[in-house]
Amino acid sequence: MRSVRVVAAVIEQEGRFLITQRRPEAVLPMLWEFPGGRVEPGESDSAALQRELAERLGVEIDVNDKLSTQGHDYEGYSVTLVIYSATIAAGEPSCVHVNDFRWVASSDFDAYDFPPADQATMDKLLGIAPPSKTN
């Protein structure tokens, strides 16, 4: 199974978190996620995250602490998602290479559809237990 390393940034400003919507032609189209992308061969996580946010949102960021690592298997490939805290150092986010972006309070995350790896990470970061299933 092919393995992909992906990095994403948790950027908080005034109690809201920056999330982005995947483009219609992307894998997992139109889902929401923390901004980031694939780590290229020979690239550090930090460099990949800085490059991806510049390409997707037109901002420069400072990458801070690693918050979590989450693995998830999709059909035909597996993803290792590494989440870092980050701050915007320069620029204002714009839809350069994303369908949309929002600043969202964590209490409103459930109004957005996230890929499974992102959802598991969000739940872990925010201390949210997955909903219990009742029959």
Image (cartoon, helix red, strand yellow):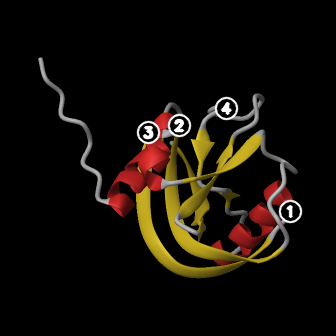
Q: Is the residue 51 above or below the residue 112 in the image?
A: below
Whichever of callouts 4 and 2 sits on the residue coming sooner in the sequence is: 4
Across and down, in percent, residue 21 comes to: 68, 41
Mark 1 Cα within 10 Å, few/some/many (few <14, many 20+)? some
Picture residue at 60% right of the left edge, 41% below the top = 32
Marks 4 and 1 sit apart, C-alpha to C-alpha, by 20 Å
Picture residue at 42% right of the left edge, 67% below the top = 68
Marks 4 and 3 sit apart, C-alpha to C-alpha, by 15 Å
Q: Is the residue 46 above or below the residue 52 in the image?
A: below
Give the label on residue 58, or none. 1
Picture residue at 53% right of the left edge, 34% below the top = 76
Give the label on residue 112, or none. 2
2 and 3 marks in contact (CB < 8 Å): yes
Judged from this view, the residue extending furthest toward the front is 14
Label 4 sits on a secondary structure element that is loop
1 and 2 marks in contact (CB < 8 Å): no
Q: Of 60 and 25, which appears nearest the observer?
A: 60
Give the label on residue 110, or none. 3
Query: What residue is shown with label 4?
Result: 30
Q: Quadrant of residue 29?
A: top right
